[in-house]
Amino acid sequence: MGLFAKALTHRSPFGRTLAAIAIAAVLWVGAWTLSYFLLSEGVLRSLMSARVPDDILKAGPSLAVTIFEWNLVFGVGAIVVGSLFAIGPISLGYFAPWWWALGYGVALGTNSFVVTAPGKIAPNISILWQHIGAPEILSYLLVAAALANIHVWRPRRWYDLGLRRVRGLAEIHLGATDFACLAVALTLLFWTAAREAAGVIAFLN
């Protein structure tokens, strides 16, 4: 655990990203494999459909922008808020994309997507090029890694409920490589939104 803690708080955001990706990959593949063999098809489809606004599928040409804004507010926003807190040295901003990697694995294993073809999806690395889920999660991991060392509050000990302030908001500083990670993340997030929008429009037509 100490090795991962060091990697997740590495001076370079690229090193932090690689460590975060390694953990996300284990969660993703593990959840995908277990759900494929143990859960029934479509078990989470109604839950995932409920999270999508009714009008998002009717946005027409602006669908990509709508999806991007949705992911920016609720995805990146959750990571930014989480990054203000840490348990020990580990930023809570990592936990949102790790949770989404876990959920994405279950969605793949049970074929619980809103727009999908019949049949459960067996674990297969080729999905990286077929679905936008993995690149989208990568963009969130880049954001989490870029903001991993900005936490303002953390408990004195990992099991404490109380928080202590470790720096002020004005003391938060990001380096050039952190901003580079954020720029790549936002670009990737818009690209995945455009691909997702194109898929939805093609399906509806």
Image (cartoon, rainbow, N blue to C red):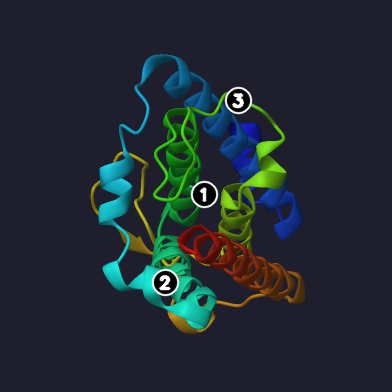
* Rendering coords of residue 14 (x, y %): 75, 56
Q: Which residue is mark 3?
A: 123
Q: Are marks 1 and 2 in contact (CB under 8 Å)?
A: no
Q: Is residue 193 visible?
A: yes
Q: Residue at x 66, y 28 (%)?
A: 124
Residue 63 lies, with reference to residue 196, above or below; the image says below
Which of disc 3 and disc 2 is earlier in sequence? 2
Image quadrant in which you'd find residue 163: bottom left
Q: Residue at x 61, y 58 (%)?
A: 145
Q: Secondary structure at mark 3?
A: loop
Q: Depth check: 21 or 55 in front?
A: 55
> What's the residue type where badge 3 is placed?
Pro
* Rendering coords of residue 122 (x, y %): 57, 24
Q: Residue at x 51, y 73 (%)?
A: 68
Q: Which residue is mark 2?
A: 70
Q: Which residue is mark 1?
A: 89
Instruction: Residue at the far front: name it.
Output: 205
Which of disc 2 and disc 1 is earlier in sequence? 2
In the picture provided, is 22 more to the left or to the right than 91? right
